[in-house]
Image: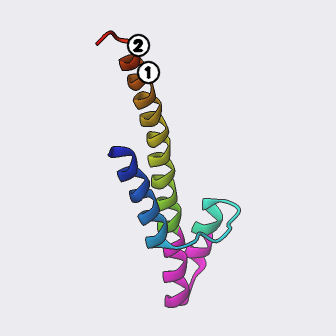
Amino acid sequence: MIVEFFKAQAKELREQHGGVQNHCTIEELMIKIGNCVDKTALKLLEEQVFGIHAEQLATANSNGVKYLEECIDLIERSLSLSPD
């Protein structure tokens, strides 16, 4: 079913990029990247940007899942009201 697909995709996105560390704003993260002089630290900060993006995609998917669940519920209720 499509709902399970979206939930699985959101889970995979979150797992792929790991946890997102706390930054006050995306601008703060970009400043840290701009000031970074160490390659390893830069890679870690870039992963945080990718993690934030993944979280945004997963959140958008979860909103889509909620909408689909509402649609499915409405369809099922409509079908139960219609004569056989």
Please name the residue shown 38% across and 23% down the image: 75
Q: Is residue 35 magenta?
A: yes
- Mark 1: few, some, or many residues within 10 Å (few <14, many ≥20)? few
Please name the residue shown 65% across and 65% down the image: 28
Badge 1 element: helix
Stretch in magenta: 31-48
Q: Which residue is mark 1?
A: 77
Q: Amino acid at mark 1?
A: Arg
Check the image and report above or below for 69 versus 18. Answer: above
Check the image and report above or below for 19 versus 3. Answer: below
Rounded to the nearest angstrom, the CA distance separating label 2 from label 1 is: 6 Å
Question: In this rendering, would 25 be left or right of 50?
Answer: right
Q: Which mark is residue 34?
A: none
Q: Residue furthest right?
A: 24
Please name the residue shown 42% across and 28% down the image: 71
Q: Which residue is mark 2?
A: 81
Q: Residue furthest top?
A: 83
Q: Nearer the viewer, residue 54 or 43?
A: 54
Snapshot quadrant of residue 84: top left
Image coordinates of residue 38 in percent, x first then y, are 54, 90
Image coordinates of residue 2 in percent, x first then y, are 33, 45
- Mark 2: few, some, or many residues within 10 Å (few <14, many ≥20)? few
Q: Amino acid at mark 2?
A: Leu
The answer to whether the residues at label 2 and label 1 have Cβ atoms under 8 Å apart is yes
Check the image and report above or below for 42 versus 81. Answer: below
Q: According to the image, what is the colour scheme of the structure?
A: rainbow
Image coordinates of residue 82 in percent, x first then y, are 35, 11
Q: Nearer the viewer, residue 41 or 73?
A: 73
Check the image and report above or below for 84 versus 41. Answer: above
Q: Nearer the viewer, residue 83 or 65?
A: 83
